[in-house]
Structures are given as C-alpha cells and as structure tokens.
Image (cartoon, helix red, strand yellow):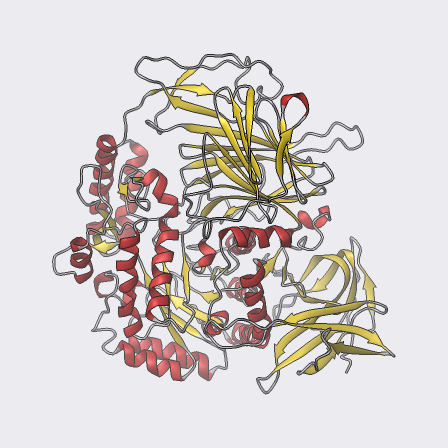
Amino acid sequence: MDGRDLVRSARTVRAVGTSQGWLSVRSALRRRRADAAGLPPRGAERARVPGTAVGAEPQPGGGVVRFARSSLRIRVTSGGAVFCGWDGATPEPSYALVGPGPEADGRAELEPDTEGGWRVVSERVTVAVSRFGAVEIRTPGGVVLRRELPPRWWDVVSEAGHGDGTRPESRSDQDAVSGDDGTEEAVRTGSCGGVSRWVQRSEVAADARFFGLGGRASGPRLRDGTYRLWNTDPGGAFGPGDDPLSLTMPVQLVVADAGTHLVFHDNSWDGRVSLHEGEEGRGSGHDRAGSCEVRMDGGPLRYWVLTGTPSRVLHGWASLTGAPALPPRWALGHQHARFGFGDAAEVRRVVAGYRTRGVPLTALHLDIDHLDGHRVFTVDRTRFPDLPGLASELRQEGVRLVSIVDPGVKAEPGNAVYESGAAADAFVREARGREVRGVVWPGEAVFPDFTDARVRKWWGGLYAERLAQGFAGVWHDMNEPSSFVAFGEPTLPRSARHALEGRGGDHREAHNVYGLAMARAGYEGLCELRPDERPFLFSRSGWAGLQRYGGTWSGDVATGWPGLRASLALVLGLGLCGVPYSGPDIGGYSKVPSAELYLRWFQLGAYLPLFRTHCAHDTGRREPWEFGDEVLAYARGAALERERLLPYVFTLGQLARLTGAPYVRPLWWNTPRDRALRDCEDAFLLGDSLLVAPVLEEGARRRSVRLPRGRWYDTTTGQAYEGPGRVMVDAPLSRIPVLARAGAVLPVAGADGDVELEVWAPAQGRKGGGLVVPDSGDGWERPCVERMESQWESGRVVVSRPDGEPVGYRVRVRGGETRAEAGEAGPDAHGGRDEA
C-alpha cells in the first residue's frame, strides 16, 4: 500500500464512518489476496496478426474468410446489420442481443474481390475484406464509412515457447498493427493471465464525429482521448472531467457527411477506446482520417455495424438488442427524491408542500435511510411504522412511492435475505469457494450472481416484499457493482467466480454486465408478480441492452454549472446508445446549489425523460420552495409545462418503444450532414417538434441558439425564426428558450385535462405533421399510432388525418406572422400572435 492508498484510506474512513472505513481497508486487502490466489499467473505472450488470406467458405449472408493464423466470419442480416467475428467468434452467447439474432440476408453472398480479397454485397451495405484482413464497410454507392485494420492478438505462449513467427507478406494493411517492421515479438502482460488480449484500429472520414460509449460526462460529442470500458462508481460526485462512470458501453455512433454508422464490440471485458478526430485538408486535398482504437483485456473480437440515417441506425439497434421498455405514464411526470427523508411524517410534509403550492408531483423516492440498518428488502419500522398505509394514502393523492434496491446483502445470521440466498447458493464466490465479502452501506455484504438464471429467479421473487410495502417502482443503485475499498478498485475481486449462464468465468468478464443482469432479474420478477402492469425500473449501472428492462440516471453528478452541462451530455449520449429514458439528479447530488443553478437545472429537467430531483443527505433540501418565492414560481411554471406536455412525452415513449428513437435527440438528428449542428452540444430536440435551449451559464439572460433548417417559433413570444443559422433569444430567469418547428402537431393536455392538438402554423406552401399515441393505461396494450398532417388551405391552417378519419381532438393553432432570418448574430425581435 503506497502513500496514495493511505490518503484514500483516510478519505474512505471519513466518508463512510470509522467502522465501515476500517472494514473497507480489510476488504481491500482481502480483495488483493483473492486476486493473487485466484487469477492465472502472468505469462509470456506472443503477438499475432491474421496473416494472408488462404481461402473462404460461403455461408448464408456471407461466410468465413480463412487467413494463415486466424479466420473472419462475416454475416449481413436481412435488416442490413453486419456481423464480424474473428477467431471463430459467433453472435452468441451475448448479453446484448435479444433472441437468437436477426436472420441472414439470403441475397448477400461472399464472392472474390480484387487483389486476393473478398466481399459481401447487399442492398444496404457492402463489406470488403482485404487479403491481409482489413475490413471496409461501404455504402451501396461504394463510399467507405469505416475501415477496420487487421487486428492484433497477444496469445499466451505454450510451455515449449513456440509461436508462429511468420513474417507478414505485405505491409499495406499491417503497419498499424504489427510494429514498425511487421514482426511479431514476445511480450508480457500483468492483467490478462491466460486470456488473449487484442487491439483493433479503425479509420473513419476526416469530417466524422464520435458519440456514445455509454454515459460520458464530457460528451455528447467525444473529443480526442481514451475512454475506459469498465463500469465504475465515481465515489461521491463526478464532473465533466471524470471517466469512466457507472454505465459504459462499447457502442460508438459515428456521424459524417458520407453517412451515419453504429459499431458495437460485443465484449464485456475491461477495455479502452482511443478516439482521434480527423482533419480536412482545407483545399489541399490531404485529409487526415479520423481513427479509433479498441483494446480489450480478453474475450472475443466480434462486432456489429449498422448503417443508414440516425433513425434507421437506432431502429436497427433496437431490433438487435431489444425494444426500450416503456415506463408507466406516471413515471413521465415530476418525481422527488433525497437521501434522508427521515420518517413518514417528513414524507407527508413534503408531498403536502407540493400539493399546497400547486407544483405537480407524481412520485416520491425513498433512499437507503428507509431501510432497517440499510439492509435491502427491509423497512425501518420506527421511522415507517405503516409503510403500506402511507403508500396507499399518497396514491390517493396521485403520488407513487419508489424504492431503492441495492445488490449488496448484509452477511449476518438472522438476515432473511442472506439466509435465503446462502441456502440457494446465490452469492458470488472466490476461486477458493468462499463467498466474496465486500463492504457497502449495511456493512459487510455478499453479492448475488445475477449471471445465473437460477439466482435471477430467486432475486426477482424478493420484489414481492417491495410491492407488499406499497412501492410502485424501483431504482437500482450501487450495482457496478460497488464495494467500499480503501485502495484499489471499488468493486469485487477480478478473480471472483460467476456462472455466466452456465459457461463459467470470472469477474473480468462479468463485471460490466452485472448491473444489466440485475436489471433483468428485477424486471422479470416484477413482470411475474404484477403481470398486468408495466414495471418501473431504472438502474445506475448496466450495459448494452439495458433499455429492455428500463432506464438509468446520471448517478452522483457534482453540484455546479459544469455538472449541469454534464447532465445534458449524459442524457444525449445514452440515447444514442439505445437507452432513451434517463435524467440527472436535479440540482446535483453533492453540494448545495445556488438558487439560480437549482432553477436552471429544474428547467432543463422538465424537458428530459426522467424528471427527478435528488441529493445527498447533507446537502440541504431540494423542494423548490426552499429556494425562495421567485424560484418556486418559476419552478412551478416548468413543472406545469411538463404536465401540459405529458401526452407528447408519452407519445415519444411509445415511439421509442416502437422505433428505438430517443425522446431527447441531438440537433443534427434529422440533418446529420449539417456540420455546424454536429458540433452543437448546448441544445437538443425533444422529439421532432421542439427545440430546447437550456441555460448552462451563470447569470445568462439571453443566449445564442443554432437552428436547423426551417422555420421555428419561440413558444412563449410567438416570434418566428428561419434556419439554418444562429439567433439570439431571451432567456429570462422565468424560463428557458423552447422553439417549435413550423407545421408541428403536438398532443398536449388542455385546460380541462383532455388531450388537444397544438399546431404550429406551417410556412406558406409547406406541410407539417406529427404523431399521437393515445394513453391506453399502464398495461401492455398495443399502441395505436395516429398520424396527423397540417397545411395551409384557403388562407387557414387545416389539420387532417391521411387515412381520412376525423381528427377527433380539439385543435389550437399557434404561430406568428413576424419572422426573422437566422444568422451568426440573430435579431432581437419579439411579438407574434396565436391564430385559430
């Protein structure tokens, strides 16, 4: 233990208390000993590259190309997705995919290409493989979207010490992966022990921009740098410079003039992704391509590529990994949480405060302080003597209770959950067979092995206790999994053994999918316990495919203006990875926000899918009236506007379920070739109809907004602006700028609570429209999607349905006659009127 470890030990003791702090020191030492005894010893390794192509075997949708020292399996699916698997890797088993995977494209065939290579041509994509193993993903027109250079492995050398020392025959595809001279050399590694590490480098267009990789505080556009693929509890609070966070994914979305593509490396091991944006020659013709390097500490080298428009790519991703779960309608409203409500009287006081002050509230979340000694699936009967009665009372007022659920189970005799799990052999074990012990909030704890179907079934049944207590939903926390340690990684030993669906393995492979598998256990348990209701579940950690079971939230984002900006980056980035339902801790988790910061965060949250306040126990209260009358009035306005937009937000949720499109979208969503929009990170689209421009800087009362092409109306003033370009708009403390697309048809709640259509007048000679999904309850009814159209006709705006059926809703037309052209310095104009 070095000096830094000693400093961290002291900080840990202060953060979690003396008793748990010293337990965390013991836990760190025990973890180190477990890995020393349970991981394979360090061994010599030898680098390997594919070598030269020696033949191919056609198969449905593609085939297998064989090289001197490896093989590559290619399959193009009927939906246009491309699978590539090296060294015999196949699409399954996979924690990301849903079902057996898509069928192969029967018309795509593997055929010889030029210079000894091979190619697969399909309607949507062409895959070309060079004789040395470089793989190009091309558009149907032949434009290269991505070029994967030949991979490189580090294999454990046998006892005889012999490796294949064949020298590559050509340097054309090999320079970037085989060293300066192309030779292979024996190396040593300290982390992999007995498992092949690998690296793969790729090239993209010089103008390409990178997005994704899960939850990244410095996004949504990912700048040059290295990003780790290892779900990590950041420990208290994080800001834009902290990486990795709780939810990482090997999912990149790459946007360029030539097209958009998503690449997913289906490998849950620890890894790193290094990104470098390209540079254009500015007329010289000498562009420098963008590049990506993926390094994994083990596991298969297999990946999927999906191409097309952003909407088509995300639809294909949802088809591959599962449709996003739709939360119940109440979970789309305003929710309140904090660590430290105290007791039932405090809960009643807070809910009454919202009611008497006219601020909508649909749910209240109870953190670990409502549990008996922080033990999962228990209740502190002193603080909450009749929790079911409290839940029933609040539900009559339209407020649901949501419970935290942590994976760590206090390891003590008499704890019913521990004894039940021990009897079922449900907990993760060390390589020597003993239960892995960590330290979390209840003290010394054990951890269920959610990679075992039998354990998931057992754990899912435990949610019956939460439902019996009156809870309507759950949020999973501490499930990276996190364990307090005074030094080293704050998680389980890498040598810990997991079932991995019967294959067997250790925590190096299971770590990143632990939160995902826990979400599956909870979701399936809730579905079985309440089969007529859609579960409400969101999780701090997860992996590719988490959207099947619920959403996520930012985790413990630091209080401050940088934390506010990071909140937006996380939601946008996660949506582009296929997780559309997310949101931040409004106000930040870690400190007391200023009144202005709290309000601006609240105003942003009102337009995000998960609209929830939350904070630590020692950072003050987060109810809006605690920040003064002015903040209360403006926060009430934001919450009421969210309530008015609920039919629209619900429609976006249903569309996410059907198409994979996120609620919150980057400005370039419909025009990915607009380079200015690709670089815009301070505004977003809510669906296709609304552009939201949050205030992210202290003291700002006006801000610049970059507009996509078309006419946009300020929803407060009615002022019309013409894009593309920049405009300056007012952003008083009372609101943030929100603009509506001309021609948009939005379902909103009318004054009487019934759904009506808010139509923003289309420009003369143009049409508009929108979709409406009526609320059919919180069950599993198949949604009915109603398409609406708007257009000018005989001097008035007419709304109709293309199927000829009556519109069936009250219609209110809005939009001003005055407009301003957008430029780099936009006009300072106001006005406009509503039209009927």
Q: Residue 325 location, x and y as percent?
A: 47, 62
Q: Residue 410 location, x and y as percent?
A: 20, 55
In the image, taking residue 725 as reference, residue 514 lies left or right, namely left
Relative to 428, residue 794 above or below: below
Q: Residue furthest right?
A: 794
Q: How many marks?
A: 0
Relative to 304, residue 407 above or below: below
Q: Give the quarter of the figure containing the N terminus.
A: top left
In-front residue for pair 24/165: 165
In the image, taking residue 353 as reference, residue 292 lies left or right, namely right
Relative to 165, residue 41 above or below: below
Relative to 356, residue 49 above or below: above
Question: Which residue is rendered at x = 62% and y = 40% of the image?
Answer: 108
Instruction: Specify the quadrant of the image occupied by residue 799.
Output: bottom right
Residue 33 seen from this side: yes
In-front residue for pair 147/539: 147
In-front residue for pair 166/639: 166
Q: Residue furthest bottom?
A: 752
In the image, taking residue 37 as reference, residue 709 lies left or right, namely right
Q: Residue 604 location, x and y as percent?
A: 56, 63
Q: Give the quarter of the figure containing the C terminus.
A: bottom right
Residue 618 seen from this side: no
Q: Residue 245 location, x and y as percent?
A: 43, 47
Question: Which residue is rendered at x = 28% and y = 39% of the image?
Answer: 493
Instruction: Specify the quadrant of the image occupied by residue 661.
Output: bottom right
